[in-house]
Image (spheres, helix red, strand yellow):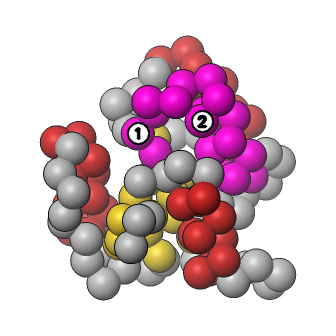
Amino acid sequence: MLEAPEGESGLALFRARVPDVMLTDILMPGKEGLEIILTLHHEAPRAKIIAMSGGGAVVSRQNALRSAADFGVRWILAKPFSAAELLSVIDAVLTGEGSGSSSSASRSSQ
């Protein structure tokens, strides 16, 4: 597992290490998650990305997650979510399963 404190360093880490799955928050300091997702969509279109958001002062959680889905993210997690829900989504993404959504997680096509 790799971890970055903000978006720009997360993008650099992705480029350097090419992880199996990337989990990104939508609202972050510096380069935000939607910018990361859009960049990766162009640079690594097959990247497996999970977006998460609890919303913010200006952007609602649903709008942020809907935007991630519009940018090609297959899985989204609404905060708060449990460790079990996160592991279930990661497993589904890695195995290519089309199900495995929970009350907090859903496929972007839903």
| Side of 75 relative to 93 (left or right) | right
Part of the protein shown in magenta: 32-49
Residue at the spot of label 2: 41
Residue 6 on image: x %, y %: 69, 45
Which residue is at the front of the view, 19 or 38?
38
| Side of 110 relative to 86 (left or right) | right
Q: Could you tell me which residue is drawn at 74 percent across and 52 percent down?
A: 32
Check whether the beta carbons of the residues at disc 1 and disc 2 lie within 8 A of each other.
no
Residue 82 on image: x %, y %: 30, 74
Q: Could you tell me which residue is drawn at 69 percent across and 83 percent down?
A: 60
Q: Quadrant of residue 100?
A: bottom left
Which residue is at the front of the view, 49 or 10?
49
Secondary element at tag 1: loop
Judge depth for marks 1 and 2 and give the one in front.
2
Kindly identify which numbered label has been placed on residue 12: none
Asked whether residue 91 is in view, the answer is no
Mark 1 and mark 2: Cα distance apart in space:
10 Å
Q: Could you tell me which residue is drawn at 57 percent across and 69 percent down?
A: 65
Please, what is the three-letter code of the amino acid marked with disc 1? Answer: Lys
Secondary element at tag 2: helix
Which residue is at the front of the view, 73 or 22?
73
Residue 67 on image: x %, y %: 65, 64
Crowd class of label 2 (few under 14; some 14 to 19; many from 20; radius 10 Å): some
Please tell me whether residue 84 belongs to the stretch shown in magenta. Answer: no
Q: Quadrant of the N terminus?
A: top left
Chief SS of the magenta region:
helix
Residue at the spot of label 1: 48
Residue 91 on image: x %, y %: 19, 50
